[in-house]
Amino acid sequence: GTGTSYVYDEISLTNGNTYTISIFVKPIINISSFAINVFGGVGTADFDLFNKTVNSTTGDFTSAKIEDYANGWLRCSAVMTLSSSTGTKNIGYGLFDFNGDQFYLWGAQVEEGDYPTSYIKTEDGIATRNQDFCTDGGDADLFNITEGTFFVDVTPYVYPSANTYISLNDGGSSDRFVFIFQSYGTAVR
């Protein structure tokens, strides 16, 4: 068919709260424009999957971003502060001009806050991320805990045709700390 097409679910939202809505999408056929929409005139975040950019945000959406996971999957996310009444809202993921387009969706998530966190697996209802704990992480005698220390004990999975990266960064390439395991398996940078 043609026209607007969405996969959606009802989520209870509170007026005045800030939420981040995110989903992983993998285009298959014909898809370029993709949207996260909160129905009832609340707002829309529109993404260009081909160019991996944000086209626009409307209504209560204040920002949006698209992240490339380098394997065909993209994570689209948008931040909104609800200005309409508290209650159940339909949140949809889909296309404005559907005409034989095909895509995969995975990991839809709505969370309070102004940035997307890593995927939180849930089966039913609300889930809260557990606090991270470091076990056997050393002590002040081993590491200088006032300066910032990175300790990596890893056996990397190396792809035959690509490098493997472990990185701590601010989302860009200027401020980062990265380990690179060369694809031929004989060098670490």
Image (tube, rainbow, N blue to C red):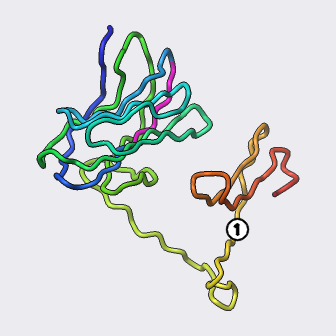
Say which residue appears at 79% left-offset and 39% top-offset: 160
Q: Main secondary structure of the magenta part?
A: strand
| Image quarter hosting the C terminus | bottom right
Disc 1 residue type? Asp
Say which residue appears at 81% left-offset and 49% top-offset: 182
Residue 94 figure quarter: top left
Considering every residue shown, the one lying at the far right of the view is 186
Q: Position of residue 61 (x, y in %)?
A: 31, 42
**140 is higher (above) or lower (below) than 68:** below
Q: Residue under label 1, please give it.
A: 153
Q: Nearer the viewer, residue 185 or 12?
A: 12
Say which residue appears at 31% left-offset and 35% top-offset: 58
Residue 72 figure quarter: top right
Q: Which residues are magenta?
A: 22-28
Seen in the image, is 49 located left or right of residue 158?
A: left
Q: Position of residue 120 (x, y in %)?
A: 40, 53
Q: Position of residue 156 (x, y in %)?
A: 72, 55
Asked if residue 34 lies in the magenta stretch, the reply is no
Q: Nearer the viewer, residue 107 or 81?
A: 81
Q: Position of residue 176 (x, y in %)?
A: 66, 59
